[in-house]
Image (spheres, rainbow, N blue to C red):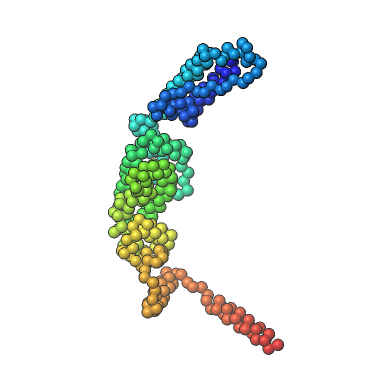
Amino acid sequence: MEEESMEEEGGGEAMMDDQNHNNWGAGGYGRHLLGERLLPPAVPPRPAGPEHNGAGLRGCEPGAAAGRVGAAGAIAAINISASTSKFLMNVITIEDYKSTYWPKLDSAIDQLLTQSPGDYIPISYEQIYSCVYKCVCQQHSEQMYSDLIKKITNHLERVSKELQASPPDLYIERFNVALGQYMGALQSIVPLFIYMNKFYIETKLNRDLKDDLIKLFTEHVAEKHIYNLMPLLLEAQSTPFQITPSTMANIVKGLYTLRPEWVQMAPALFSKFIPNILPPAVESELQEYAAQDQKLQRELIQNGFTRGDQSRKRAGEELTYNGSSACASSRGYR
């Protein structure tokens, strides 16, 4: 009897210690939620042996069996009550979300949106990921998505105002910084909200979080500045190395990602960084292509870029060629 009571107490402790409620079904809680009658746990048969003969048979009497079943049922009821209370304690109300969970997400998003490349951000990605997961499980996905869109929209409106106040000589560089900083932030923000994207945006809105956030930059920044930015890019293109080639490439490729139809505003500019923008080359226009290359070479020379001493290189090539030919002819003569 002592061993039985220890086994029953051990089973109760294991069930109460399970923080993840993995024993709901085993303890009957799942069946209780479905409206089924809670059945007492089956009592294992007692092993046969000398100690169970004679007086030991008193443990098999109906009264003793009923007592054990009643005690087991009482322990199961206590375990169910404890599991239920633990489950209710984990509920996240809308007030909890607004006062505890969203402030953590808000602060992390702020740091991600304003970080510079290579900066160290003192945030716990595991903690932010866990916050998002819990809020999705507690049916706060809609509110969290709304807060995220509003947060990023406000940030992009501030970025747009700062660009409007930029002088022309810094406009291109600052636009490049804003574009690169935002796209870099998306590489962290989108994975952190992957559960919201999977179980709310994709399933209920039939969209994708990354596409939605890229669209925000297009609407609140790029569309407002494209007609000021494009003339400056064309002017910079006509003056080699007025801006660095990497900056020009980043902006042109970024604009194409945001809205491919902007290619029509400057096809020649986009074709320098994005393949297959212009129609295929035709033989009748080869002279025009050659003239364009010669013009570019003249512009580079005028800006101080030289081709180097080509005479020595060509002389060496001819010497090598003539020497190899002479050796070949001598070997053939022999």
- Please, is residue 106 above or below residue 85 in the view? below
Residue 145 appears in the rendering: yes
Outermost residue, right direction? 334
From the viewer's side, name the closer residue of 267 and 193. Answer: 193
From the viewer's side, name the closer residue of 195 and 172. Answer: 195
The number of numbered discs placed on residues in the rendered structure image is: 0
Residue found at x 57% / y 22%: 45
Spot occupied by residue 26 in the image (x, y as percentages of width and height): 49, 28
Quadrant where the C terminus is found in the figure: bottom right
- Please, is residue 242 above or below residue 79 in the view? below
Outermost residue, front direction? 54
In the displayed structure, does residue 123 sit left or right of residue 45? left
Spot occupied by residue 35 in the image (x, y as percentages of width and height): 39, 27
Spot occupied by residue 213 in the image (x, y as percentages of width and height): 36, 48
Name which quarter of the figure residue 329 lies in: bottom right
Residue found at x 43% / y 45%: 191
Name which quarter of the figure residue 168 lies in: bottom left
From the viewer's side, name the closer residue of 156 and 233. Answer: 156
In the displayed structure, does residue 291 sit left or right of residue 118? left
Residue 10 appears in the rendering: no
